[in-house]
Amino acid sequence: MAQQTTWTKKDLTGIETLSRAEIEFLFDQAEKFLPALAPGKGLDLMHGRTVVNLFLEPSTRTCTAFEISAKKLGAEVVTINTTASSLVKGETLRDTAMNIRAMGVDAIVIRHSSAGAPRYLGEVLDISVINAGDGAHEHPTQALLDAFTLKQKFGKVEGLKVTILGDILFSRVARSNIHCLTKLGAHVTLAGPATLVPLSLAQAFPQVRIVHDLKTALSDADAVMLLRIQHERQTTTHFPSLAEYTSQFGLNAERAAWLKPNAVVMHPGPINRGVEVDSDVADGPRSVILEQVRNGVAVRMAVLHLCTSALKR
Amino acid sequence: MSNKNTILVRGAHVIDPANGRDEVADVFVKDGKFVAQLSAEEIKSAQVIDAKGLILSPGFVDLNCRLGEPGRSARETFRTGTLAAALGGFTTVVTMPDTNPISDNVGTIQLIRELCVAHAVVNVLPASTLTKQQEGKALAPMGSLKKAGIIAVTDTTSGVQNNEIMRRALEYANTFNLVVLDHCQDSSMTEGAQMHEGTWSLRLGLRGWPRAAEEIVVSSDCVLASLTKARIHLQHISSAGSAEIIRRAKANKLPVTAEVSVLHLLLTDAALAQYDTRLKVNPPLREESDRAALIAALIDGTIDAICSDHSPCTSTEKDCEFDLAPFGAATLETAFSAAYDALVATGHLDVKLLITRLTSGPAKVLRIDAGTLTVGAAADFVLINPKTSWIFNKEVQLSKSGNNPLIGKTFTSRIHSTFVGGKAVISDSKPVQL
């Protein structure tokens, strides 16, 4: 049961700064928004408010999900992507944000390649700032929708064994999930090659287990979260080739058979089919990938609603 | 009517490590130099300073700073930078050659010297690059540069990545008795790196800068010092491993010296938890075990000198995403007071050793006649109030920079006066109107 009855944060910059009670309070709110996902069932809680999607790094899914979430709540949405932004003309992030704020905006949803950028904006601005992914730091709404999906599937997150497989070192999704899942009482295993899953992660995140053997990592898991192999964030030194990665760590039907019968397969998308996961697994009975996508809208509605409600009017 | 050319400092606690002095005594200055005594006649007309309760130390010598000019006068100028140095007790500073244009040629060194004659209030000793355009490919004309007035050679933060070039550079510099100052960074290991590689870099999602990137070059420098017998000074050492390698090199009588920056003695990577761009420095702040090892190395003499590593930036340059912020912190004004509180007030070392590492230590690295109260030497000295309380803020600051991370901090010791060549530059902790 959620202990907390209020939400006071105007920004969502990461999971690390949230309490378990805040996460559960947010889940309760998301739960209430699920019926609004049906066609023709939009709400008007954010009527008259404007949300700007400031995406300074390519994104389709997250950007669209935020746009739909805001519209389902009755808000106006403007999306700025990196090519349209004046940032390419040399304007600073502060100036861009101050200009957007001056136009009477209630919330900025920001995706940025620099870790810490949403936090910086949150300090500069007196409107809501939502982190839609900052460098290799955090992607809080992804972790929230992942845990929300697990809660839906298993009834609770407490006690679940979750294996996160792949590029942990460069992954903001992994970092946010580590924080979120451990706060909610799950046991997290990080798996993949040692270049992407260094042992030093265990010092940074003492609650997690590091495993480099795939069978060990999969055999006792209730859920396996696959991470997209991110070509744009890797130098060539971290693994030899995509084919090598697939041959050693790709989730195919044979390896999926190592999982417990009721274990689920998750992926934040977009999927590299045939790289980190085979199509028959991604589309198979274990997959909850499309439920994740659907829940992502409800969770982001909750984030937008709670953060903008916390703004001092 | 006092005679400005003669000064009598009465009753100070005199600390002069070069001469082994640590006593309450009077100090005499005549015509810009220390003298053993003044005549009765001279005392009558001398400027008398009552320094009871103050420490009198030789002026500090900084082996590593940047003063903006030429090329980056929005960050700092020779006037503002040397005023900041004087406020921090430094009377001699070595400037890095990563200027614009790069200080790899006689013309730029001459320009620096002319600008300093006109604007500097402390002694500025420029270093030139070791290689042309700081590219690590072809040697800079060190012989001509020495004639033009350089004190040392360094490729500063570019380092020299090629061991053959480094070997020849050491041999060539040694021909002219120039010490090579080396910034130890294997840049193949630090591409895109933002901070120390450790638990904090993993948590913050910032690209890590491993200790090994420094230690590998510290090691190769020691090997090359053994090969060439040329003097090599290792700049702003940051890791426990580096300190240990240098300790062994010194035990083997290799001609190696080393410095540490004040910030690395004060802070660790945990200070970056809020993505404070003012603490984004090169080399990066490391862990508590490193900080402790650096203090131990400072005490046992493995590290010869404390430097400011003053790297001024404008506040606008630092007001951005962490990845995009330039490296560097402004530190000249707070170096002594911060080190005093971190090292002396906490009982790690006594004030005499701190002063040693700020005066005779760095002077020996350069083999210059500074950082001493020796009779006949230039009267560069400071008076320090060791029992006070003051806040370093914008009103006090003389540097033009906007990136001193210690702004707003309270300190328990303060530079009271700074004299350069017998002339007061700072008096009562304020700049003297020149």
Image: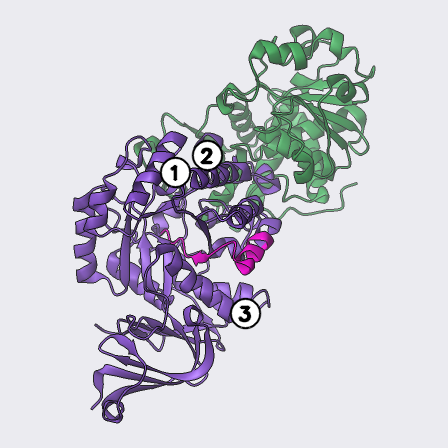
Chain colours: A green, B purple
On the same chain: label 1 and label 2?
A: yes
Q: Of the residues under marks 1 and 3, which one precedes in the sequence?
A: 1
Is residue B83 shown to the viewer in this render? yes
> Are circles 1 and 3 on residues that touch, CB within 8 Å?
no
Q: Mark 2 = which residue?
A: B186
A175 horizontally vs B71: left or right: right
Of residues A32 and B170, the one nearer the viewer is: B170
Which structural element holds mark 2?
A: loop
- Please tell me how crowded label 1 is: few (under 14), some (14-19), or many (20+) other residues with Cα within 10 Å: many
Q: Of the residues under marks 1 and 2, which one precedes in the sequence?
A: 1
What amino acid type should be assigned to the residue bearing mark 1? Gly
Which part of the image, by quadrant, shows the N terminus of chain B? bottom left
Which structural element holds mark 1?
A: loop
- Please tell me how crowded label 2 is: few (under 14), some (14-19), or many (20+) other residues with Cα within 10 Å: many
Q: Mark 1 = which residue?
A: B159
Residue B350 badge? 3
* Residue B15 lies in the magenta stretch: no
Seen at 41% across and 56% down, the residue is B308
Disc 1 to disc 2, C-alpha distance: 8 Å
Of residues A201 and A189, the one nearer the viewer is: A201
On the same chain: label 1 and label 3?
A: yes
Seen at 64% across and 41% down, the residue is A16
For disc 1, the chain is B
> Are circles 1 and 2 on residues that touch, CB within 8 Å?
yes
Which part of the image, by quadrant, shows the C terminus of chain B? bottom left
For disc 2, the chain is B
Disc 3 to disc 2, C-alpha distance: 35 Å
Give, as a single range, the part of the protein colored magenta: B292-311
Seen at 29% across and 61% down, the residue is B82
